[in-house]
Amino acid sequence: MTQQDAMALLDELLEAARTGAIIPVRLPGQVEAIKNALADSQPPTEDNHSGDGTEEAPADMQAFLKEQAEFMSVAVHELRVPMTSIRGYADMLNTPSMGELNDMQKQFLQTIRTNAKRMETLLTDVSDMSKIRGGTLKYTIKMDMFKNIAMRVEKDMAPLAESMGRTLTFDIPQGLPVLNTDGDLLAKALNKLVENALRYTHEGGTVTVRAEANDNVLRVVIEDDGIGMTPDDLAQLGTVYFRSDHDYVREYKGSGLGIPIAYGIFKILDGQVDVKSEPDQGTSFAITFSGMI
């Protein structure tokens, strides 16, 4: 899409928003093209340059992204209702009161439940990513101990680690100061990184989560001994929908939203991310938070 086409598309969308007309759903690539074209049309300045090296979208584009986020929130809610019903009836069919099932029928029901759960997770991720980009993700800052947050992550991820034959360990010392953060959001972001580490570590591998404090800075490290990443992969890390071409990565049907969601949440919570990785040598994510009390 050329810059002229992108500007014409944006004008069409803004006019539809002003007149109350139906706004057509746009593919993510089209939205990215609009943002890139607008960014190319003006030089970076202190006023439109963000702290992470990316351009801030103009006010009109921010309004469009916000409206898209609100639309996506409604759409996800409407899609989640039938998915919940599908899972519920699948569970009901698997109860003794519905009669004995043969092995093939049980396998079919398990496939339905697995894919319904995957769809629900995808819907949540799409909604979260849309809210992050539109600036509408809700969060509440309050005092929380990181050890409590880490315990939530361990509770969420331990079953996955066991089912995949990986070892998940937590090294969280006592005495870490209280954080001013949204504990639920932080746990969600850490879950994304831990799940990613478990997925791309070979069977029998180890994923470790550890934390340490230095004055008013908390450093959380998630490291694995998995497949690692190439320099090209590292350069693309955090890009929406990006997935490595590594055969081991392609075996897992991911959406390419996990890391971008985690990065978006860390940015909201003023966390700084540093990544180190080498092919076949594992990966280490280090996230630092300042302002502890």
Image: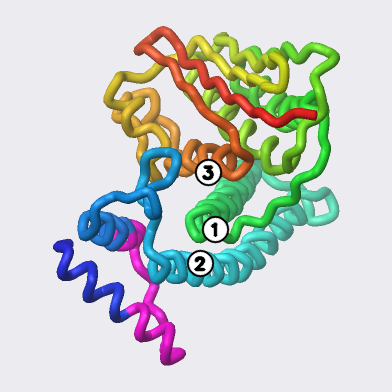
Please name the amino acid that badge 2 sits on: Lys
Q: Where is residue 36 in the image (x, y as percent from the top left)?
A: 27, 55
Which stretch is magenta? 13-31
The residue beneath circle 3 is: 264
Q: Does the magenta stretch include residue 12?
A: no
Give the image's coloring scheme: rainbow
In depth, the one of 211 and 24 nearer the eye is 211
The quarter of the picture where residue 286 lies is: top right
Q: Distance between the residues labelled 2 and 1?
A: 7 Å
Q: State the quadrant of the N terminus.
A: bottom left
Q: Which residue is drawn at 64% across and 12% down?
A: 167
- Other residues around mark 2 within 10 Å, as few (<14) / some (14–19) / many (≥20): many
The residue beneath circle 1 is: 135
Determine whether the residue tagged by mark 3 lies in a helix, strand or loop.
Answer: helix
In depth, the one of 148 and 155 nearer the eye is 148
Please name the amino acid that badge 1 sits on: Gly
Query: Position of 114 compared to 199: left or right?
Result: right
> Do labels 2 and 1 touch, CB within 8 Å?
yes
Up the image or down, 193 lies above or below 18; here it is above
The residue beneath circle 2 is: 66
Q: Which residue lies furthest to the front in this view?
A: 46
Q: Residue at x 42, y 87 (%)?
A: 18
Q: State the quadrant of the C terminus.
A: top right
Q: Does the magenta stretch include residue 15?
A: yes
Determine whether the residue tagged by mark 1 lies in a helix, strand or loop.
Answer: loop
